[in-house]
């Protein structure tokens, strides 16, 4: 991220796609950039995108055209987002693609599918995969993903600058008065908080662990896909963040404790023990 207040001296580690295992995801302590995954398409034309997304309704927050949510047909959205003068507020990152037909064009890495507890309950299965369509100029301020989940994003084309801060720094960055995280752009970033920075390009996947605070700037139009995850090994961080969300009246409506118990029971006795320990 250009103008990061305090980047880590070491770069975000890069990992070949074959080295990404469930064990890596269970013990993840830093963001990761995964490279050379051969399964996703190398490119996707707007015509192909329209075909794949046909019939899908996209709910999109348009920051610069009325500051509001708007429902788009995928056809209209792809036209608006791919126009040379596209509104830089057009940024789809959370339209879920649960349907199996999307497997062929937006695959999920097998290690992610094996390790992700969220896949195993119908109340959270949609977090497994979403489409990413971002116009150049978009900016997403500092935030933590809902329920303290980790996240991943694969870019087929484009470029995104990520800045990511470790989970244990989260409470110090939260402003209970504004109900928001500090943002370096508004000048209220505390001194001495180190962050991981990385530029993600076509053919690469970013993975960040649960509870990590992050912001993203998009200088080039992006096509990609991503999702959210929580693993048994990292469930404590997720639960801690979720409890803070509850205390701040920011939590979603899911019975997340029940979801975690059910999902972990369907996984292994070790996973269930980790979830029980995290929930206390
Ligand atoms: O790409 C973006 O603009 C935001 C992505 C993000 O923050 C997320 O997926 O959690």
Image (cartoon, helix red, strand yellow):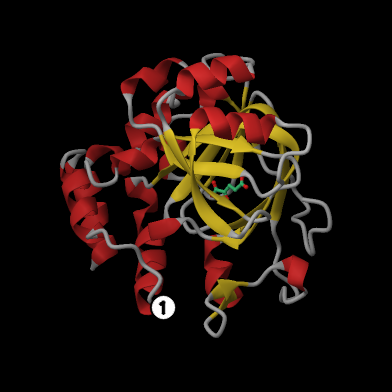
Q: Nearer the viewer, residue 190 or 100?
A: 100
Report which quarter residue 178 is drawn in.
bottom right
Residue at (56, 36) in percent of width and height: 132
Q: Residue at x 21, y 46 (%)?
A: 264
With respect to residue 184, does 77 lie above or below? above
Looking at the image, the residue that sits furthest to the bottom is 177
Kindly tell me whether residue 106 is visible in this rendering.
no
Identify the residue at horizontal 72%, vertical 39% (top origin): 86
Point out the image quarter for the C terminus. Answer: bottom left
Q: Quadrant of residue 188?
A: bottom right
Residue 93 x, y percent position in the rendering? 53, 43
Q: Is residue 202 left or right of residue 172?
A: right
- Where does the image place residue 59, in percent across and percent down from the top left? 46, 45
Indicate the position of residue 181 as horizontal and vertical percent values: 59, 70
Q: Residue at x 51, y 60 (%)?
A: 144
Residue topped by disc 1 = 248
Is 150 on the left or on the right of 189, as rendered?
left
């Amino acid at each position: 991220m250009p103008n990061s207040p305090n980047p880590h001296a070491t770069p975000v580690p890069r990992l070949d796609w074959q080295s990404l295992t469930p064990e890596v995801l269970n013990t993840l302590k830093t963001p990761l950039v995964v490279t050379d995954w051969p399964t996703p398409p190398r490119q996707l034309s707007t015509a192909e995108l329209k075909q794949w997304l046909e019939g899908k309704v996209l709910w999109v927050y348009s920051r610069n055209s009325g500051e509001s949510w708007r429902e788009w047909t995928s056809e209209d959205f792809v036209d608006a987002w791919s126009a040379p003068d596209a509104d830089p507020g057009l940024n789809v990152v959370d339209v879920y693609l649960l349907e199996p037909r999307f497997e062929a064009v937006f695959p999920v890495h097998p290690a992610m599918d094996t390790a992700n507890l969220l896949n195993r309950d119908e109340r959270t299965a949609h977090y497994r995969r979403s489409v990413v369509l971002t116009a150049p100029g978009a900016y997403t301020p500092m935030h933590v993903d809902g329920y303290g989940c980790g996240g991943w994003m694969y870019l087929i084309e484009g470029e995104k600058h990520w800045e990511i801060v470790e989970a244990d720094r989260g409470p110090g960055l939260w402003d209970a008065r504004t109900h928001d995280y500090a943002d370096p752009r508004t000048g209220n970033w505390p001194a001495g908080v180190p962050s991981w920075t990385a530029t993600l390009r076509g053919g690469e996947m970013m993975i960040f662990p649960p509870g990590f605070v992050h912001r993203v700037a998009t200088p080039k139009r992006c096509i990609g896909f991503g999702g959210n995850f929580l693993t048994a090994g990292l469930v404590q961080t997720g639960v801690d963040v979720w409890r803070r969300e509850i205390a701040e009246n920011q939590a979603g409506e899911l019975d997340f404790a029940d979801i975690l118990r059910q999902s972990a029971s369907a996984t292994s006795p070790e996973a269930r023990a980790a979830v029980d320990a995290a929930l206390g």
